[in-house]
Amino acid sequence: QVQLVESGGGLVQAGGSLRLSCAASGRTLSNYKIGWFRQAPGKERELVASIGWNSGILYYADSVKGRFTISRDNAKNTVTLQMNSLTPEDTAVYYCAARYYSAPTYPYWGQGTQVTVSS
């Protein structure tokens, strides 16, 4: 079982930055793929970024390419999402999720952290 806890959300003005962290316990994350998802009010949850178990495979949604950076520190069992040049469209609850590298879906989820970007 993997427990995930997000932190780092908050209120920021457009153009600002936030750094989200996802801390894991229960299992080492070294063999897990980690994804950051977000869900805005009235919208479906979307995958924002993901990182492979060895950091070799990265994915970014088109809407965040060039602005967000995902990274991981397996020694510290944490995954970070650096978000720059934020816009009001980035306002959402952000969740980190984990799946074993060979699993098809993400069974482990954090409780989410709110990100609000004011114009």
Image (cartoon, rainbow, N blue to C red):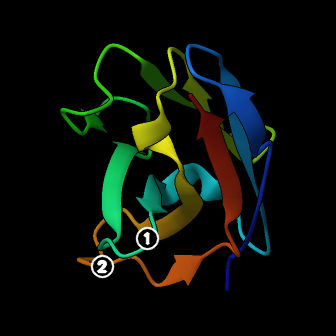
x, y percent for residue 25: 81, 68
**In the image, what residue occupies the spot 45% across and 24% down?**
68
Q: Residue furthest left?
A: 62
Point 32% across, 56% down: residue: 47
Q: Residue at x 48, y 36 (%)?
A: 88
Quarter of the image for residue 5 reads bottom right
Q: Which residue is mark 1?
A: 99
Answer above or below: position of 109 versus 34. below
Q: Does the CB distance between marks 2 and 1 fall below 8 Å?
A: yes
Question: Is 71 situated left or right of 35 in this image?
Answer: right
The tag earlier along the polypeptide, 2 or 1, is: 1
Indicate the position of residue 1 as horizontal and vertical percent values. Answer: 67, 86
Above or below residue 13? Residue 50 is below
Say which of 91 and 2 sits in front. Answer: 91
Give the quadrant of residue 73. Answer: top right
Residue 35 in sight: yes
In the rendering, at what x and y percent does residue 54 appear?
44, 37
Q: Amino acid at mark 1?
A: Arg
Q: Is residue 84 left or right of residue 107?
A: right
Q: Secondary structure at mark 1?
A: strand
**Front in this rendered view, residue 6 or 25:** 6
* Marking on residue 105: 2
Amino acid under label 2? Thr
Classify the position of the C terminus by image quarter: top right
Q: Is residue 80 visible?
A: no
Mark 2 falls on what kind of element?
Answer: loop
Q: Residues within 10 Å of mark 1 (few under 14, many from 20)?
A: many
